[in-house]
Image: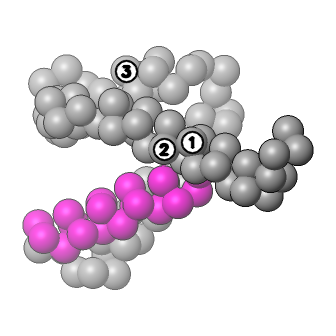
Amino acid sequence: GPAYFFLMMEALEQAGTALGLPAETARQLAIETAYGAGAFARQSEDDPGTLRAKVTSPGGTTEAALAVFNTQGFTQTVKDAAGAAAQRAEELAVLALGDKR
């Protein structure tokens, strides 16, 4: 799981530098964004979808970015990736246990 979030942070850092931010600034922004989002989620009783809606201003920059994620199938990609990890875990369990299951 943590690698999934690190990948997102890595992508945000790369996007920031591609947009002209200094590398260290892009890195710190990615880290602080991840930290802030995690802390907000921990302290809230709201589900992630509600939290996302609360921080998305209609017609704003976040809404524009989320539209790209939705168009490019972000949610399905995450589901597919989790499925691939679960399948591999099952394969590794079979290898470890042999036919003793």
Q: Residue at coordinates 81% horizontally, 45% vertically from top-left?
A: 99
Distance between the Cα atoms at labels 2 and 3?
28 Å
Q: Nearer the viewer, mark 2 or mark 3?
A: 2
Label 2 to label 1: alpha-carbon separation: 5 Å
**Quarter residue 95 falls in:** bottom right
| Vertical placement of residue 5 versus 81, above or below | below
Residue ID for mark 2: 84
Q: Work out which residue is located at the far front of the displayed protein and give it.
A: 99
Within 10 Å of the Cα at label 1, are there few (<14), some (14-19), or many (20+) other Cα atoms? few
Cβ–Cβ below 8 Å for labels 2 and 1? yes
Quadrant occupied by the C terminus = top right
- Find numbered disc 2 in the image and state the secondary structure of the residue it sits on: helix
Magenta region: 1-19
Residue 87 is marked as 1
Secondary structure at numbered mark 1: helix
Amino acid type, callout 1 = Gln
Q: Quadrant of residue 19?
A: bottom left
Relative to 1, 21 lies left or right: left
Q: Does 48 sit above or below residue 83? A: above
Q: Residue type at mark 3?
A: Ala
